[in-house]
Amino acid sequence: MSSHPHSTSAPFANASIKNNAAGDKPTVNELAQSLNKIVSEGRNPDTLDIDTLGTEGILTRLNNEDAKVANAVALQIPLIAKAVDAATISIKNGGRLIYIGAGTSGRLGILDAVECRPTFSVPDEMVVGVIAGGEKAVQHAVEGAEDNFGAGRTDLESLSLTQTDTVIGISASGRTPYVSGALEYARSLGCFTGAIACSPNAAIFENADAAICPVVGPEALTGSTRMKSGTAQKLVLNMISTSTMIKLGKTYQNLMVDVNATNEKLKARALRIVMQATDCSEDAALAALSACNNKAKVAILMVLTGQTAKQAAAQLSANDGYLRKAVEESK
């Protein structure tokens, strides 16, 4: 059994997803009708005259629309929290956080995943981004990739997905067959599944334990979901990965202390972090870092407690790498 709780799904719109799974592609008319039901595909009454404006006028309208995004995301915090808690459990149990999407949504997932390694010093395979159409689709559109329901499952199978993983599907419209197929497969294995879409009753929510739906309204340019919808998705992904890493002990206060300085730039960052965390002098920070092979966490604990590098490393290990716990234990 999976360690993740599952919610009961209600009926969701867009039967064309299932038709596609069976090999019956929806007609153009069916697709047009489904677009009419998607909030992000509606026409925005506040930008009907945007093509008549000067440069600053256009930018002001775009900025006015962007201002709506953060509030829409804020309403989803309880559901985002479910995804964070699930991802934390997964990683603690040796699993992964996996994002999967198509087009802009897939690229945003990859962007968030690849930033975790340099930011938090975690292995590349801990947070993974998957995009319909594979690596080529990162820079070029791959015709039909998002419509392939079965490919979502296939791509997760290629990662040797297990129930210890958390899978987050991303689709602005919420009707991407590739994402629906991936989430259906992930849930069948007992994975915790989350879905991020910007239209209520999205098809991808059918197999989601956390249906995250920041409703940002119609785009400034009708149907251009790389805009507000994309921004909302990026904010949610930032929140999921950052909060998960905080809960895994990758920070101390608001400092990214899990830095193993392997080049001059990172050594300078580690030095600054140690000084900020301890209010010590540059010389004291350098001495501590030199004694512990430039591991900022260990150096901070050394400065705060007066321990040797070996003692500090042992105390950190005894506290599962949580620096705050180690500091409080030593008081």
Image (cartoon, grey):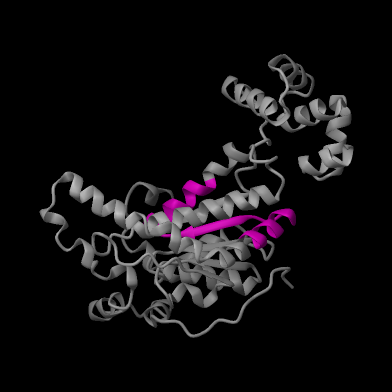
Left or right: 87 in relation to 20: right
Q: Dominant secondary structure of the magenta stretch?
A: helix
Residue 61 falls left or right of residue 208:
left
Residue furthest to the left: 52
Q: Residue at x 71, y 59 (%)?
A: 89
Q: Is residue 74 magenta?
A: no
Classify the position of the C terminus by image quarter.
Answer: top right
Q: Is residue 324 left or right of residue 167?
A: right
Q: Is residue 107 part of the magenta span, yes or no?
A: yes
The residue at 54%/75% (across/down) is 207
Q: Residue at x 57, y 57 (%)?
A: 98
Question: Is residue 21 placed above or below 169 in the rendered structure?
Answer: below
Residue 308 in the image: x percent, y percent? 87, 24
* Quarter that holds the N terminus: bottom right
State the residue at coordinates (48%, 85%): 11
Nearest to the observer: residue 208 or residue 56 = 56
Q: Which residues are magenta?
A: 84-113
Question: Where is residue 176 shown, x and y percent of the image?
Answer: 40, 69
Instruction: Give the side of residue 88 with respect to residue 79, left or right.
Output: right
